[in-house]
Image (cartoon, helix red, strand yellow):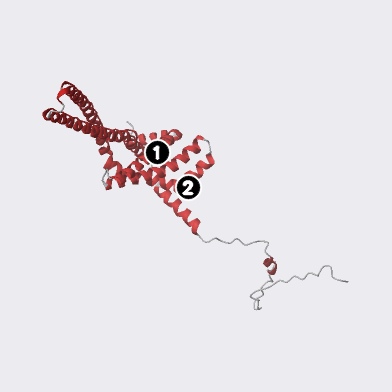
Amino acid sequence: MADAGQVRTAAAKFIENHKTAFDGAATAVDVLGTLSGVVAIASLFAGSVAIAPAVLGIVAGLAAGALLIEDGRMFYYEITGNELRKKELASSWHYQMVEAVAPWLALPDLAVSGLSTVREAGQTARTVAGASNRIETTAARLADQRDAIDAYTQSHATKLDQSNITTKIQRMRAKANKLDKNLLRAQSKLTAASRKLVVLRTIGLPAYAGTIYGISVYGIDPPSLGDGLQATQKAWHDRFASPVSTPDPHHPAHLLVPGQTATQVAGSVQPVMQFQVAVRPKTGASQ
């Protein structure tokens, strides 16, 4: 039976042989992760979630955005067959660092909010169902109450000036108004819960499923953080290092240096520096 190392090697080879497909899937997951970060930002400003989970979601969203840029470029170069750009990007410091570090930034959000998102989706679905039932029941009661008001008013049309009749109609209308307000609240709650459920089903749940997928692929064939650090160090050194001047072999000062130096004789005094002066007759001088 093959051990875990052989299975992992076979999986890594399969991923490498189908790199374009896996990079395309990674890009789609990055889009969902980025959108999930946007939702976390909106939730933080709306005050609908605690600060800590929202911050973790924002960090994960930023990491997904960085991955989206790098994975998207790599996927584009692969589908367009641009091998030169693909190799340049794969060897760049920013690609190596993002690929090595960004997946780790999504783990805290997955650990804190992953299961709670699944539970929240279930609770929100139940809230939607309950609000829909309340709306249906309240709407039916409101319609019955309004019919009762109309029927009572018509049957006592000749007695509407009597105080007991007027009081009864006012009470019936007050009950109808209360049912109407309850209906509006239920409809508002249904709208908010439905919107939240759509976000959870189209962004939240797929984003966390995508994070699990991405971490799984990352665990099979993880990028080298050491290579990324070395590439980053080299890139920053090359950018900020002092430029080294290259001597010009055709500079006129080279004419002052003799082509050959005199042979040194023991006991003789040799000059520390020699100059070679070339004298050229002035052209065009009178004879």
Q: Tell me what residue is drawn at x 25 percent, y 36 percent.
A: 120
| Res. 31 mark | 1
User: Please, which residue is most extreme toward the left here?
Assistant: 164
Total labels: the figure holds: 2
**Left or right, 74 with reference to 255:** left
Q: Visible in this render: residue 223?
A: no
Q: Position of residue 166 (x, y in %)?
A: 14, 29
Residue 244 vertical placement versus 7 (above, below): below
Give the crowd class for mark 2: few <14, some 14-19, many >=20 residues within 10 Å: some
Q: CA distance from mark 1 to mark 2?
A: 22 Å
**Left or right, 214 with reference to 89:** left
**Left or right, 54 with reference to 150:** right
| Res. 194 mark | none
User: Please, which residue is most extreme toward the right here?
Assistant: 287
Q: Visible in this render: residue 60?
A: yes
The residue labelled by disc 2 is: 92
* Quarter of the rendering occupied by the C terminus: bottom right
Could you say which quadrant of the image residue 27 lies in?
A: top left
Q: Tell me what residue is drawn at x 25 percent, y 35 percent.
A: 189
Q: Nearer the viewer, residue 45 or 70?
A: 45
Q: Position of residue 229 (x, y in %)?
A: 42, 51
Q: Position of residue 208 (x, y in %)?
A: 32, 37
* Amino acid residing under circle 1: Val
Q: Nearer the viewer, residue 93 or 2?
A: 93
Q: Which SS class for mark 1?
A: helix
Give the crowd class for mark 1: few <14, some 14-19, many >=20 residues within 10 Å: many
Q: Earlier in the sequence, mark 1 or mark 2?
A: 1
* Quarter of the rendering occupied by the N terminus: top left
Callout in the foreground (1, 2): 1
* Amino acid residing under circle 2: Ser
Q: Nearer the viewer, residue 179 or 264?
A: 179
Q: Which SS class for mark 2?
A: loop
